Image (cartoon, rainbow, N blue to C red):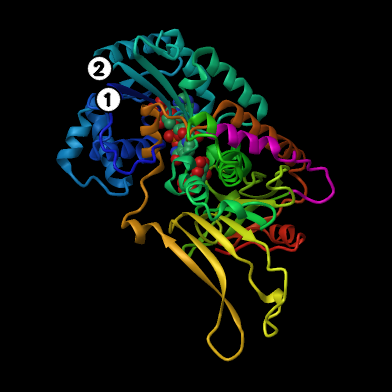
Amino acid sequence: MTLSLTETSENFGPCAMVIFGATGDLTKRKLIPALYSLSMDHRLPDKFSVLGYARSEMNDEEFRRKMRDATSEFSGAGLKNETAWEKFAQQLYFLPGNYQEPKDYLRLKEALAKLDRRNRIFYLAIPPDLYAPVIRQIAAAGLAGRGTENGRWTRIIIEKPFGSDLATAKALNREVHEVFDEEQVYRIDHYLGKETVQNILVFRFANSVFEPIWNRRYIDHVQITAAESMGVENRNGYYEKADMIRDMFQNHLLQLLCLTAMEPPVSFTADAVRDEKAKVLRAIRPISPAEGSPVAVRGQYASGTAGGKEVVGYREETGVDPKSMTETYAAVKLSIENWRWQGVPFYLRSGKRLAKRVTEVAIHFKKPPLLLFKACPVEQLSPNVLVLRIQPDEGISLTFEVKEPGPEVCVNSLSLDFSYQTAFGTAPPEAYETLLLDCMRGDSTLFTRQDWVELAWSLLTPLLESWQATRAENFPTYNAGSWGPEEADAFIERDGRRWRRP
Ligand code: NDP
Ligand code: BG6
């Protein structure tokens, strides 16, 4: 992560990126388009190669053709420039191989030696149950290397999900550390690569006006929303085994919470930032689902409408068990027990097939203490809300009360608004561009550290276990295109608050 807006050339030495699972969805939709965009911006090292590795038989030319089609379809800007694509494509190679076959890793080693790139990144874009076996094979072939050896470095990027509960995450961390030092490990949470997510830190720590009021004296509560209008699309096989807490809360939502709630780090280095984020998770009161008032609600989408079209319910999606009890919606209330946040609830919610796609962090300030304007009772005032709009329509807004023109003192809500598109004339870059570049630079600020991933799982595992044990009972549904189950409204209204309808 760099705070310089002017940097254009990079100098981190020749680098080869091996993508395991290079025939998959992530590679074609995100990784190759991101690398192409970096190449267009002259941000890749001069000597750079991608070596795609997967079981499917393909030669370099076929791989290049498939990646061209994918980039043309999935890159925000499209291909734009055939010559630039051709230049980039010359750096793409493909090696068919099995993920668990030692002989194939020796061929991989030979192929890498031929490419003659000093530094290496291994990207695990494969199903999660293959992470550990592939890491073992990388080590067995002598491809891992600890830290920086003889001026060359080796790094590994591991996709999410990292484990499916605390025990599996710990076991995976042990496997990873058998082979790689923590400094070599880049656990991806693509939310951290989003410009607007990084901007939470800049907004908080590069402005002096907000920090004094960023605490329990002025803030009533915080709502963090990641709503999607999409269903599970073509990822139902994965999603049936995941669910909402594993898919969105353990990573993206908790990261947003940490960036919003953390103390200022002592410096802007990877460990200083990640230390503060880990402290937030340590300060969260453990979730005890058995306690009196509910700390979380869940739901699953039924049929309804999305984008003006009739859509089926989750259980009718192709490949989903017609009796599936997998949650596609969750709302969780968390309490951070430290001096800054004591008594300020953080409400987190995420759902598929909700009314619209929107991700935001909304800071709800307290109401003014006193009734001054007789024509307008204090209960009618809308407390100030600062909204950090992560996506789409990236920006920031602050609502405040103003006097309506006229002889009476009547108060109305307006908002100050900042929009990325209007201010900078461009949409923010794709998260994967930032993350891939940061990994090449050796900057792990925007990647998840071992302690954080385990703390996140240790917070949520009791909830997962409790929901698993009670899946047959009390399982609310919601219509596709709505804002979630009625139970979620009752959940927050019990505290005298309401969900935003962004
Ligand atoms: P895919 O399901 O598309 O799988 C990637 C590749 O892995 C496939 O092309 C296939 O290649 C190989 N593969 C798939 N299933 C198996 C299997 N059972 N045994 C052996 N090989 C298999 O995954 P994605 O590309 O969608 O995701 C890759 C990783 O990234 C996953 O861990 C996922 O959770 C994560 N991720 C993906 C996101 C996305 O948007 N797609 C978003 C966030 C995370 P071949 O058969 O040719 O070897
Ligand atoms: C992924 C989840 O990590 O994030 C998906 O696995 C989800 O289920 C996606 O749709 C949301 O990402 P974004 O960037 O579209 O908000």
At 70% from the left and 84% from the top, the residue drawn is 374
x and y, in percent, of residue 16 in the image: 31, 22
Q: Which residues are magenta?
A: 273-295
Question: 97 or 426, which is in the foreground?
Answer: 426
Residue wearing tag 2: 115
Within 10 angstroms of label 2, few (less than 14), some, or many (20 or more) residues? some
- Residue 247 in the figure: left or right of residue 375: left
Contact between labelled residues 1 and 2, with CB atoms less than 8 Å apart = yes
Q: Amino acid at mark 2?
A: Leu
Q: Is residue 264 visible?
A: yes
x and y, in percent, of residue 103 in the image: 38, 9
Name the secondary structure under disc 1: strand
Question: 305 or 442, which is in the foreground?
Answer: 442
x and y, in percent, of residue 116 in the image: 25, 15
Ligand 1 position by quadrant: top left
At 25% from the left and 34% from the top, the residue drawn is 9
x and y, in percent, of residue 290 in the image: 82, 42
Which of the image's four quarters has the N terminus? Answer: top left
Residue wearing tag 1: 49
Q: Residue furthest left?
A: 83
Q: Amino acid at mark 1?
A: Ser
Above or below, 146 relative to 256? above
Q: Is residue 229 visible?
A: no
Question: 237 or 393, which is in the foreground?
Answer: 393
Magenta-drawn stretch contains 50: no
Above or below, 29 relative to 490? above
Question: 175 or 117, which is in the foreground?
Answer: 117
Above or below, 69 relative to 216? above
- Occupied quadrant, residue 156: top left
The mark tally for this picture is: 2
